[in-house]
Image (cartoon, rainbow, N blue to C red):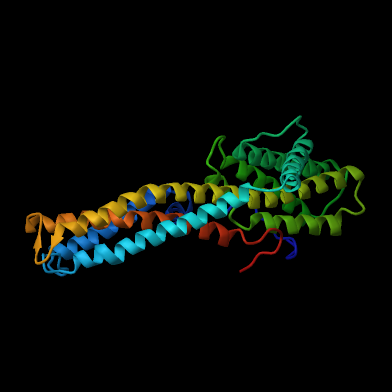
Amino acid sequence: MDPELRTESSVYEKTAWERVRAWVLIEGSRPVVAGGITLGIVGIVGALIWGDILAVGPDSSVDSLFSSGLTAGVVTLITVTLSINQLVISRVFGTVNSLTDRLDGARELHEDVASLAEQPSSPNDPAAFLSLIARTLRDRAETLRSMGDSGEWDPPNEVTDAVRDIEAYGEDIDSHLEDNTQVNYVLNVLLGTEYAVNLRAVQHVRNGYVESAPEAVQTEIRAVEELLESIAVVRQFYKTIALQQDFAELSRMIVYTGLIAFVTTIAVTLVYRESAVTVPPSLLPAVVTLGLGIVTTPLTLFVSYILRAATVARRTVSVGPFVPP
């Protein structure tokens, strides 16, 4: 195939390790990931305490740790979360003109896709909408390839192979989607650079091989290009939706767990008195370990959500055919 005409026939297939990493960073439930991190912290600290490496006795500095360091940390984390919540809310507000522009842009995208798919309308469900784009891309590429097979135009073999790959690419996207799937999972299908590679290939075919082709062929190649551009737009729009949903959910969960963590820091601090404790010393390892697990829960939730946001943002930097290393 022409080195300028590289295409991708499927979304990126992950290895076993990459699937595990993708689940932790993107696909997995954020509370579950946070729970795993919390259990890891509790397990390590508990093992060190029961191994007499960490001291939690009446004369230890546990009360100072909980009363000052951890309490200040919890309050700071809640403050940071409120700032994130303000950022999310700011995206909801807008003037009449700006809100109208957003609505018009979304409606225009839906109408364009419906027109290319020859449907009266396109679905509202994100997964179903992307599935419609993918199926239409497959059908349009198949029609374009059949025109070459029927003799309406005579493309070289590398162009036929490129169109076949794009047809398979649309089919593969559709095979990964189910209706009413969470936006984060739908977005995960598009995190690769395949759309950009195929978009560049279509532009190369249009400019180098289709200019003298019949009008019907030019119409189909333009439709394929518009559908790949729609995938690029949808990729960025779904990123916006996913991050807004995540940050809004993170704000709510930090408020809940932050209040519980704040009460826990006070309770563990008051267990300690000067050179004495209010519970049997044999129970201190369990009390401190459990208290530490509760207090670190807001932080682990914050880490789990920020990991997903940072990963999605990093992998969707490019809007069009430019693919950063």
Location of residue 99 in the rendering, given as x and y in whole percent from the top left corner: 71, 45
Taking 300 as reference, is 163 left or right? Answer: right
Which residue is located at x 35 percent, y 59 percent? 74
Does the rendering let one see residue 165?
A: no
Does the rendering let one see residue 302?
A: yes
Which residue is located at x 65 percent, y 35 percent? 124
Location of residue 77 in the rendering, given as x and y in whole percent from the top left corner: 41, 59
Which residue is located at x 73 percent, y 32 percent? 121
Location of residue 51 in the rendering, given as x and y in whole percent from the top left corner: 13, 65
Q: Tell me the quadrant of the picture where the N terminus can be found.
A: bottom right
What is the number of callouts on the image? 0
Location of residue 26 in the rendering, given as x and y in whole percent from the top left corner: 48, 53
- Quarter of the rendering containing residue 147: top right
Q: Tell me the quadrant of the picture where the C terminus can be found.
A: bottom right
Of the pair 314 and 102, the residue shown nearer to us: 102
Taking 79 as reference, is 38 left or right? Answer: left
Of the pair 298 and 214, the residue shown nearer to us: 298
- Quarter of the rendering containing residue 135: top right
Taking 160 as reference, is 293 left or right? Answer: left
Of the pair 94 and 178, the residue shown nearer to us: 94
Which residue is located at x 69 percent, y 52 percent? 232
Of the pair 196 and 113, the residue shown nearer to us: 113
Farthest residue toward the top? 120
- Quarter of the rendering containing residue 144: top right
